[in-house]
Amino acid sequence: SVAGATQLLALPGYTPALRCCVSALNRHRFVMPLVAAAVLPHGDFAFDPSLLSNPTSRAAADGLHRGSLLAGRLLADAAPDAIVLTTPHGLQTSWDVGIYQNAALQGVATVGRDLQESFGPASPRKLYPVSLDGQTDAGLAQQIMDVLSARHNVTLQRGWNGVLPMPLHWGEVLALSYVANASAAHCLPPLVTLGLPLSRYNLSSAVATGFLQLGRDLGRLLEASSKRATSPASSRARPFLEPAFSEPSRNLSLCEHRSPSSPRPTSRTR
């Protein structure tokens, strides 16, 4: 589970071992350019546990938050040339995994809205924006498209003729903010964003096998790449949590990148 993975990272003695592995990969970058991977939550209670007042819920969220910070640090310390992000709440097709193609990426997540939708418009009273800008690694995105499309349902997604930023929201902004905030420059390397399709909601048993194979093929592609890459997955981790009622706080993250439905049946991913 996401909670288990992030809590494992927080265990005494475990993080140094992971850092040692990352250091070894850095020394032998020609062996495995896929230098790190992690599951990062996009729930706002994990991003800001102070949204919660219930002691049990707050303790669970605090543990998830600490683990998420460590996972973000792990990915930032790997110093990747690119980040390949898998998101379940981005742009979605019916069956295909969508690869964002626009050069610029930009979005805002409203922290507190996740709990507001779950518990009603009266909760929580604490709402604030978190912003994130990024750039797409167009070459790696095209390479992933070219390789994976031979066996899987993948497609490039471009909006507004590529002249405007592709929008990002909570599924991408909050997950990537852990990495951006852990980096010395508070910004991200180039990104490749993979949006999961609508079929995952009600047809997960039909597409699960294809998704697993796609993941294996993506891993092999990245390992054979000349670029050092990390591959975080944005995911929900929601134990039963009750909202708090507190005053608005500051924006916790602002990262600016400064460096260069009709189902379509198919046998490949289904």
Image (cartoon, grey):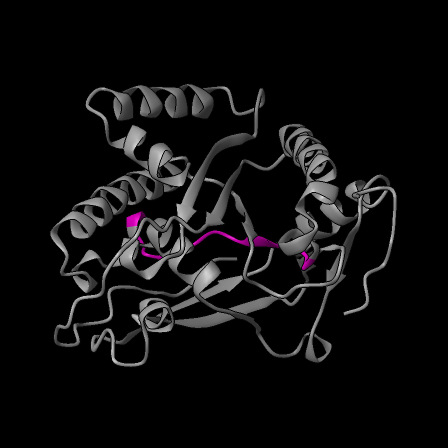
Query: Which quadrant would the N terminus be assigned to in this image?
Result: top left
Point out the image quarter for the C terminus.
Answer: top right
Considering depth in this image, is 45 or 117 the residue closer to the camera? 117
Relative vertical location of residue 267 with respect to residue 195 in this rendering, above or below: above
The prevailing secondary structure element of the residues shown in magenta is loop
For the image, the number of numbered tags is 0
Residue at screen point 68% across, 63% down: 101
Instruction: Tell me: 235 left or right of 43.
Output: right
Q: Residue 266 placed where, x, y %?
A: 87, 49
Give residue 165's position: percent from left, percent from top: 57, 74
Task: Look at the image and tell me whether residue 174 can be seen.
Answer: yes
Q: Nearer the viewer, residue 69 or 186?
A: 69
In the image, what residue occupies the spot 63% across and 55% down? Answer: 201
Q: Is residue 28 magenta?
A: no
The stretch of residues the image draws in magenta is 182-198
Q: Residue at x 25, y 75 (%)?
A: 123
Inspect this view and state whether residue 258 appears: no
Within the magenta stretch, is there residue 187?
yes
Residue 84 in percent (x, y) is at: 56, 46
Q: Which residue is at the front of the view, 67 or 166?
A: 67
In-image side of 127 versus 147 (left or right): left
**Measured along the vertical axis of the image, is residue 81 above or below residue 160?**
above
For the point 47% across and 50% down, the residue is 234
Residue 16's place in the image compared with 129, above or below, is above
Query: Picture quarter containing residue 257?
Result: bottom left
In the picture provided, is 235 more to the left or to the right than 61?
Answer: right
- Residue 108 percent across, percent down from the top left: 41, 73
